[in-house]
Amino acid sequence: MKRLRSWLSLAAVAALASALFGSVPSAAAASPHMALDCSQGRVACTEVQDPEKVFGQGVYVGHDEPSVLFYSNQAGAGNRMQYQLTLPSDPPQATANAFNFQLHPAFWFGMAMCDTQSFPEQLTTCTPDSDSNIVDPAVSPNHPGVAFMEMQFYPPGWVKWPPGNSCDATKWCAALNIDSLSSNAVTNLDLNPTCAARTGVEYVNFAFITTNGRPQPNSPPNPVESTLQTFTPDPNADLFMNSGDRITVTMHDTAHGLFIGLNDLTSGRSGSMTTSARNGFGQVKYAPAPSTDCTNIPFDFHPMYSTSSELTRVTWAAHSYNIAFADETGHFDNCAKVVNRGNCSVREGV
């Protein structure tokens, strides 16, 4: 079976990119604004509890996402951990029935984060690394604003970011995503349409893991300022990894945000990212209509909780996540012909 990269025509790639992101010019140009559109069911986006409320009637963005949740009442279990993993390998091309990019466009490690401009928009404070943030939404809406971090790994061999989700024909890459929801749980008012058209009501801070711990050049992570370059892999800056490599993933809070480090024990290379204002991470100021304000607030994103349990939740997400691992299974259909908004007129499953 041929790699599906060869099956998708350049015209199809361009049509898919245009549908998901609007016009996608060359990254070598002035790198215009770009943000992930979670209403289109991007696998990089955290699934919301009520997609029709967030994205409109008839819009569904759900997907298969088998997960493992880690629970512990030990202090630090909700904000400090280390994982050991081996990156999956693809079968020999001549005998393969399916490649990793077909089986799972990403897998990720997750954590709940403080975001005072995110749902439920009731409090202006959030104490990092603290179980004082636990509030049962069935009892009170006064939960601190919460976001969800996904440390995502992307398999090789498919169309490259941003229309696709690979960074290279043969090498893995990784990116840190922080999803927030700009919606008020009491008034049901969302971020104003002018700003939502730029960032989304569910918006994402996005940064590839780099070898120097700083975002790629001209690649602000926050969705108000993010550009095409933010979502375009840079082999001169990003940590690329080989299939079969053994990776240590380390996460812990710092004075200026969550630190994530990847140490490739096989190649000896490493990369990292810290969710700091200095690195360009930021909140979208919650401003419902009639305001048209669309302001980035530079922000250090910190873990929300001290421990991890069924009570340490992201209250707007479809799952009761805090510390978690998930595999984005499925998602893949070879698209023989792209029609309007990235839909396929002919679907051929794997």
Image: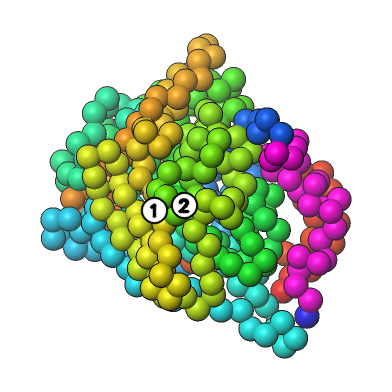
In this image, 235 relative to 319: left or right?
Answer: right
Could you give the CA–CA distance between mark 1 and mark 2, rounded to whole angstroms? 6 Å
The label number, if any, that marks residue 210 in the structure image: 2
In this image, 350 relative to 52: left or right?
Answer: right
Asked whether residue 258 is in view, the answer is yes
Q: Residues within 10 Å of mark 1 (few under 14, many from 20)?
A: many
Where residue 315 appears, x then y in whole percent? Answer: 35, 43
| In the rendered image, the vertical position of residue 317 relative to residue 241, given as above or below | above
In this image, 337 relative to 200: left or right?
Answer: right
Asked whether residue 345 is in view, the answer is no
| Secondary-structure class at tag 2 | loop
Where residue 209 appears, x then y in whole percent? Answer: 46, 53
Q: Which amino acid, mark 2?
A: Thr
| In the rendered image, the vertical position of residue 292 relative to residue 221, given as above or below | above
Q: Give the position of the C terminus as an image quadrant.
A: bottom right
Stretch of the chain drawn in magenta: 2-28
Q: Residue at position x 52%, y 51% from top?
A: 237
- Toward the top, the furthest residue is 290
- 44 or 33: which is nearer to us? 33
Q: Is residue 271 magenta?
A: no
- Marks 1 & 2, CB-CB < 8 Å contact: yes
- 6 or 55: which is nearer to us? 6
Q: Is residue 13 magenta?
A: yes
The label number, if any, that marks residue 272 in the structure image: 1
Q: Quadrant of residue 147?
A: top left
Q: Which amino acid, mark 1?
A: Ser
